[in-house]
Amino acid sequence: MDITVHHPRDLSAADRAAWTALQSEAPSAGAPQLANPFLAPEFALAVGRCRSGVRIAVLREGGRPAAFLPFHRSPLGVGRAIGLGVSDAQGLVHRPGLRWDARELLRACGLSVLEFDHLVADQRPFDNGSWQPHASPVIDVDQGYQAYLERLRAQSPKFLRTTLAKERKLGRNAGPVRYVHDERDPEALRTLARWKSAQYRRTGRSDRFAQAWIVRLVRELFHTRTDSFAGLLSVLYAGDRPIAAHFGPRTRSVLSCWFPAYDPAYAKYSPGLVLHLRMAEAAAAASMDYLDMGRGEAEYKDSMKTRELRVAEGWVMRPHPVALGHWAHRASRRALRSAVLARPELRDAADRLFRQAGRIRARG
């Protein structure tokens, strides 16, 4: 197998087309997670325009592309999945049945270690027995929106009944409810960013929109539109006023739920939940397969999901002093976090601490 490494801007049009074809064929080949938009060439190209060190490995068989691995390489040869921390799907996009040698791949990429936090399923050559699995809830809409509503009525009847009632009340009290699935107004995107930043501060979380490269990435993706990929901004309006919005990438079959937020002045109507139902309806109408709500626990995800995918966190490495140092540093942090998440009393206490810090920050 021949492995070459490229800067995203140097990837040929033929290679990009081959990458897209592998993604398009993935669902019918039994690997639907490979169709995730975070694994698309458009996402890798956009990240490459926003950050240095982004590279793409191309694996060829008989001169033809068989797989693509986007990654971020540090000067010391430490590799990370591109968009680590903000991408909800990572891994090697490959043809069905391909087997590769992880150490050989790392060596060709000039890496001593390669880290993931959302490694998708069926990446067995990367499996070293130490990966930590996580659930990634999804909303299946491949059978149509009405079929999805029937599932919700069976599994979350109170949630659905309450959400639909709040939507009707919102229409009576705040003006006609209107949903735009593909909003092209840049001002609506800026409004969403302000809401999301305020939410991060309010809950004591790190503000991703305070990072210039993420702001630029979102803007790049908003203006990226091909036949197989787009950055999708969806907005819920009450009258002429936007009250909830979501931005995330989509392929032909998968919509990734990435940055949702709403106007806190309308919180009593649960506009974020109404928005997600409208997104599911529009995705079904577009003949998509599912919405990926992403790794992480949340009550609304439990209420809306139809099933869960599995993603994994960990790293693969080859014998090298840099890899050993990276492993020692990351393993201790991961063990501490795992201990907190595994014990509800510690997890709840940490969440209260974050929220208290957010309130203090807001007052200051």
Image (tube, grey):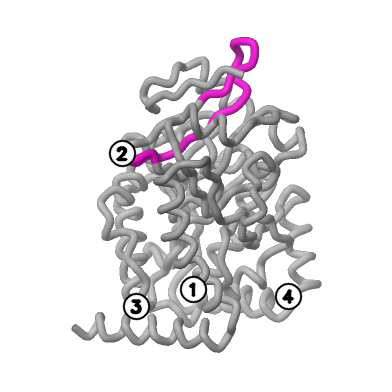
- What distance separates the C-alpha of mark 2 from that of mark 3? 36 Å
The residue carrying mark 2 is: 75
- What distance separates the C-alpha of mark 4 from that of mark 2? 50 Å
Q: Amino acid at mark 3?
A: Arg
Q: Secondary structure at mark 4?
A: loop
Q: Main secondary structure of the magenta part?
A: strand
Residue 6 pos. (x, y %):
41, 24
Q: Which stretch appears magenta?
A: 58-77
- What distance separates the C-alpha of mark 3 from that of mark 1? 25 Å
Q: Secondary structure at mark 1?
A: helix
Upstream in the sequence, badge 3 or badge 1?
A: 3
| Outermost top residue | 63
| Residue 287 in sight here | no
Upstream in the sequence, badge 2 or badge 1?
A: 2
- What distance separates the C-alpha of mark 1 from that of mark 4? 34 Å
Upstream in the sequence, badge 2 or badge 3?
A: 2
Q: Amino acid at mark 2?
A: Pro
| Mark number, residue 299 | none
Upstream in the sequence, badge 4 or badge 2?
A: 2
The residue carrying mark 3 is: 202
Task: Between residue 252 and residue 32, name the one nearer to us.
Answer: 32
Q: Secondary structure at mark 2?
A: loop
Q: Amino acid at mark 4?
A: Ser
Q: Residue at x 55, y 46 (%)?
A: 316
The residue carrying mark 4 is: 156
The residue carrying mark 1 is: 336
| Outermost left residue | 364
Quadrant for the N terminus, please: top right
Asked if the magenta segment contains residue 72, the reply would be yes
- Looking at the rendered image, the disc whose residue lies closer to the viewer, 4 or 3, is 3
